[in-house]
Amino acid sequence: MERKRARGGCDSCLYYEYDEEYETYVCQMDLDEDEMAHFLLEEHFACPYYRFGDEYTIVRKQM
């Protein structure tokens, strides 16, 4: 999944990471079928997995 219209936006989500294989940012959480349908159809999808991750949190996770 590439986009996530979440509470705080994908850019600040801990699970939003760059995928070198696809050369784009993707969500690392696996959404079930219903969640994916809501994500694709709703403009204001409130992701249940959104976790704030600032630059420092994300870098620490990658090390």
Image (cartoon, grey):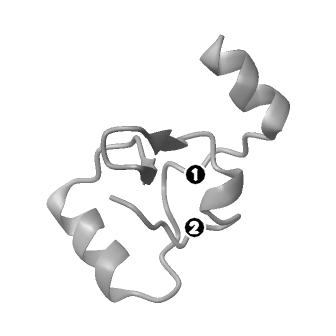
Horizontal side of residue 12 vs 37, given as left or right: right
| Quadrant in which residue 29 is drawn | top left
| Quadrant in which residue 33 is drawn | bottom left
The residue that appears at 48% across and 76% down in the rendered structure is 45
Horizontal side of residue 29 vs 60, given as left or right: left
On-image quarter of the N terminus: bottom left
For label 1, the residue is 50
For label 2, the residue is 6
The residue that appears at 53% across and 84% down in the rendered structure is 44
Q: Are marks 2 and 1 in contact (CB under 8 Å)?
A: yes
Place of residue 39 in the rendered image (x, y in percent of width and height, measured from the top left):
36, 73
17 or 14, which is in the foreground?
17
Calculate the distance from the C-alpha at mark 2 to the C-alpha at mark 1: 7 Å
- Amino acid residing under circle 2: Ala
**Circle 2 — which element?**
loop
13 or 34, which is in the foreground?
13
